């Protein structure tokens, strides 16, 4: 992970250096910016994976295209498998979506890849494929309908009947003491069931093992991007309104303030909860944007005190993924959370939605 993060930071750092040296070369500045944004998005994906491993990531069911998820994982899978294993990815051209937790499905695929690697100590081939299958009435487990079939096949020695029978049982493992928890395949099965499907394991016709996830196909709505969206002009229909930004990290705070000012808002800023409360004594903001993890007074504590002064002013938290549950617990499920890293469009839509009344807390 450290190696991958350093590579991503190198891309971001290099992109900014090039932009600083040749700011007038518009076409190249756009290309460098795209590279930096792509690297930041990959870094966010790695962070989600780390948090999911540490059980700090909140479960989020959203529709997404499985084939795109696998394509995005190619580099991570290549590094995980090592040079002795050939990775073959065969993706269905149909943009078939499922309703699941993207990070958990990423981890399920990664777990399957690691198991396959361990089953091929002398090298081999790992094949990951997706396709759409229709199941008619009569399946003993699943209701009829369309499913996305995600298969992970290796060329190892395969599995005995006894292992096949118990493979998805919690805590069952064929690995030695200290080398496996026995939870990997049971988590894979749980992810599949959560997505309205199931998981199956069998020996392949040409040897090796094949794990197949059948995931209930979801409707691909218009708001699910099939590729990275082009930058669009973001306007603030509530320009001139006051936004109070509180973050102890100067660079993050300055960036948020500059984005909001670009959108047309009047911005107040504070580096701590105490300073923010002093500001609120004399000026009533229209929206408050708080960081959660701050020294001294965290965002949830600040929110409680801010509501005593201005109970009708909406509050947005800019938070890392690990803070989500703590924020919601502190505010009784009424939190509106922007998860870092967020883009300009997301910030603009959230602030404007609050001011227009189209965005509301879960408990509001």
Image (tube, grey):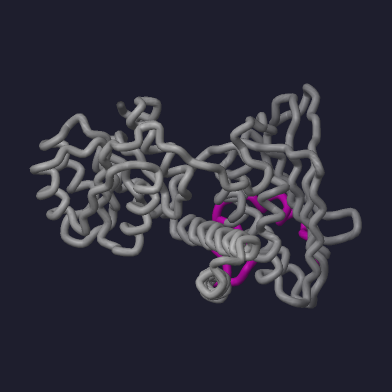
Question: Which image quadrant for residue 146?
Answer: top right
Q: Find the magenta span and give its range.
A: 156-183
Instruction: Check residue 227 for magenta coloring.
Output: no
Left or right, residue 363 beside residue 24: left
Q: Is residue 298 above or below residue 289?
A: below
**In the figure, 137 relative to 147: above or below?**
above
Please provide percent x and percent y for residue 172: 59, 57
Residue farthest toward the front in the current orientation of the protein: 24
Instruction: Tell me residue 24's x, y (percent).
Output: 57, 66
* Residue 164 covered by magenta stretch: yes
Vertical order, 47 against 147 (above or below): below
Q: Residue 337 at what x, y percent from top left?
A: 37, 43
Q: Position of residue 49 (x, y in %)?
A: 52, 58
Q: Quadrant of the N terminus?
A: bottom right
> Mostly what secondary structure, the magenta segment?
loop
Apparent side of residue 259 relative to residue 209 in the rendered image (left or right): left
Residue at (68% x, 43% y) in the render: 226
Q: Is residue 192 left or right of residue 314?
A: right
Q: Observer-nearest residue: 345 or 149? A: 345
Name the residue: 87% across, 60% down: 207
Q: Is residue 216 visible?
A: yes
Quarter location, residue 194: top right
Furthest-top residue in this view: 137
Instruction: Report whether 225 appears left or right of 204.
Output: left
């Amino acid at each position: 992970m450290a190696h991958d993060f350093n590579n991503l930071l190198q891309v971001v750092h290099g992109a900014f250096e090039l932009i600083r040296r040749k700011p007038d070369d518009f076409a190249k500045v756009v290309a460098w910016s795209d590279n930096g944004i792509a690297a930041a998005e990959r870094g966010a994906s790695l962070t989600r994976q780390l948090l999911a491993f540490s059980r700090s990531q909140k479960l989020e069911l959203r529709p997404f295209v499985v084939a795109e998820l696998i394509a995005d994982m190619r580099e991570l899978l290549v590094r995980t498998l090592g040079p002795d294993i050939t990775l073959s990815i065969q993706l269905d051209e149909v943009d078939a979506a499922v309703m699941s937790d993207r990070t958990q499905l990423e981890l399920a695929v990664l777990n399957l890849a690691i198991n396959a690697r361990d089953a091929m100590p002398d090298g081999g081939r790992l094949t990951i494929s997706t396709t759409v299958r229709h199941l008619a009435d009569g399946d003993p487990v699943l209701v009829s309908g369309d499913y996305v079939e995600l298969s992970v096949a290796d060329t190892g020695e395969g599995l005995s009947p006894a292992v096949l029978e118990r493979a998805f049982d919690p805590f069952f493992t064929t690995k030695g003491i200290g080398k496996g928890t026995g939870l990997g395949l049971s988590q894979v099965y749980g992810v599949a069931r959560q997505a309205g499907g199931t998981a199956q394991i069998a020996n392949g016709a040409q040897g090796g093992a094949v794990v197949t996830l059948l995931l209930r196909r979801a409707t691909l709505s218009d708001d699910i991007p099939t590729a990275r969206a082009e930058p669009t002009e973001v306007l603030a229909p509530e320009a001139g309104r006051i936004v109070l930004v509180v973050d102890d990290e100067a660079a993050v705070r300055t960036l948020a303030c500059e984005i909001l000012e670009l959108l047309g808002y009047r911005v107040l800023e504070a580096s701590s909860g105490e300073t923010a409360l002093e500001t609120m004594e004399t000026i009533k903001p229209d929206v408050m944007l708080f960081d959660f993890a701050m020294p001294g007074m965290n965002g949830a504590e600040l929110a409680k005190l801010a509501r005593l002064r201005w109970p009708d002013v909406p509050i947005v938290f800019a938070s890392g993924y690990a803070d989500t549950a703590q924020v919601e617990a502190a505010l009784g499920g009424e939190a509106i959370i922007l998860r870092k890293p967020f883009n300009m469009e997301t910030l603009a839509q959230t602030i404007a939605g609050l001011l227009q009344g189209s965005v509301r807390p879960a408990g509001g």
